[in-house]
Image (spheres, rainbow, N blue to C red):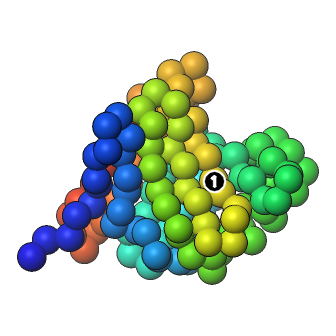
Amino acid sequence: MTRETIRHEGERQYLVAITDSELSAVTFVRDYIQLHFDGPMINTYTLPTVVVGGSVFSHADPGYRDALCARIGATVKAVYADPGQQLQIDFSDGSSLSISLRSEDRVVQEAAVYTDAQTKEWASW
């Protein structure tokens, strides 16, 4: 039995493979960020925005890295992509990460890529 990776509901795509997983690590690699979920990961080539409470942190803001790394250990409530708009990761503590999928915000062809080395599944936006 294979596990469903992405569920489509209209235009919206739900990345169900990491729902209920914890963000286990954040890796900063030169010009992109890796979000690890105990195996599966998302490479974010368009850097995510972090929303915690009423505060919004973009990559150039003071406290951005702290806000992003503070999500380590948080449980993923939902992950969904609205094509051409954003890839959103909502956590059970009410915080979220948002990766723009708008063409004008991209620095390379893909804004984000999901990979799972164990199942060999992947998706890109």
Left or right position of 118 against 71: left
Which residue is disc 1 drawn over?
A: 97
Question: Which residue is most to the front?
Answer: 10
Q: Is residue 70 above or below residue 108?
A: below
| Residue 110 in view in this figure | no
Where does the image place residue 43, in percent across and percent down from the top left?
A: 48, 52
Residue under the point 47% across and 56% down: 79
Q: Is residue 87 above or below residue 72?
A: above
Residue under the point 81% across and 47% down: 56
Residue under the point 38% across and 52% down: 14
* Disc 1 packing (10 Å; few <14; some 14–19; many ≥20): many
Q: Which one is in front, 35 or 12? A: 12
| Residue 81 in view in this figure | yes
Left or right position of 21 against 46: left
Q: Quadrant of residue 125?
A: top left
Residue under the point 77% across and 43% down: 58
Where does the image place residue 65, in percent across and percent down from the top left?
A: 77, 59
Where does the image place residue 53, in percent across and percent down from the top left?
A: 82, 59
| Quadrant of the rendering where the N terminus is positioned | bottom left
Q: Which one is in front, 107 or 4? A: 4
Q: Which one is in front, 97 or 33? A: 97
Where does the image place residue 44, in percent across and percent down from the top left?
A: 53, 48
- What kind of element bears circle 1? strand
The amino acid pointed to by label 1 is: Leu
Q: Is residue 70 above or below residue 32?
A: below
Q: Is residue 82 above or below residue 66?
A: above
Question: Which residue is most to the left?
Answer: 1
